[in-house]
Amino acid sequence: MRRGKILAALVALQLGLALLWRGVESARAPEAPLAWESLDAPAPALVVVRQGLPHPVPPETHLVHFWATWCGPCLTELPELLEACEDEGVPLLAVTSEPWPDIASWFGGQVPGAIVRDPDGRTVTDWQVSGLPDTFLVEDGRLIARMGGPRDWSSPTARRFLGEVAAGRAGRL
């Protein structure tokens, strides 16, 4: 008889915990959307270098991301963005105007291929970068979208966004 009461108490406890879990899960806020500002303007010229040599701008749809080693939010965002773009197959140019030795030091000598340098510092002005980080979506030589400030590029929403870009559906975002 006593065993039956213990078993009933355990079942009641499990049921209570299951209801509590369901309540907590249903109270969670939905995932925040990946906010961006829609644009429709010609992309300014982008002249960048990598280790002192001219670096080509991708002909296909790509992201241009402005960052700096001294930018606090960039410390978290840039590694996530590099990984997400590589995973999803989205070309990325991560632009900074800092000297190459500082960039190489920041990456511990292993600078990812997407990292490029603005040799004269004018690109930030030409692209009207208002703060760091700042990310632009470029398609067919036109600015399609701008994402000012940091984003969580590891989120499912960001990954879906990058998947749409990689699939050539950026113009319909």
Image: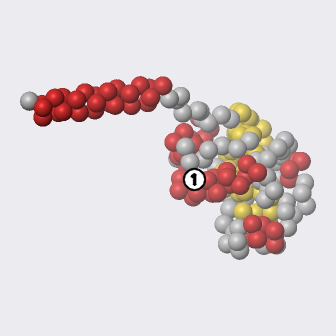
Q: Can residue 11 be seen in this view?
A: no
Tell me residue 92's x, y (percent).
Answer: 66, 56
Of helix, strand and loop, which one carries label 1? helix
Give the left or right position of residue 83, taking residue 104 as reference: left
Between 158 and 19, the residue placed more toward the observer is 19
Q: In which quarter of the image is residue 17?
A: top left
Please report the residue visible at 72 percent of the width from the left and 33 percent of the height from the top: 37
How has the structure been colored for display?
secondary structure
Give the left or right position of residue 16, taking residue 64 as reference: left
Give the left or right position of residue 125, taking residue 41 as reference: right
Q: Vertically, is 157 above or below 112?
A: above
Q: Can residue 88 be seen in this view?
A: yes
Amino acid found under the numbered disc labelled 1: Ala
Figure quadrant of the C terminus: top right
Tell me residue 146's x, y (percent).
Answer: 73, 39
Q: Vertically, is 116 above or below 35?
A: below
Q: Residue furthest left?
A: 1
Residue beneath disc 1: 84
Please report the residue visible at 78 percent of the width from the left and 42 percent of the height from the top: 42
Q: In which quarter of the image is residue 94?
A: bottom right
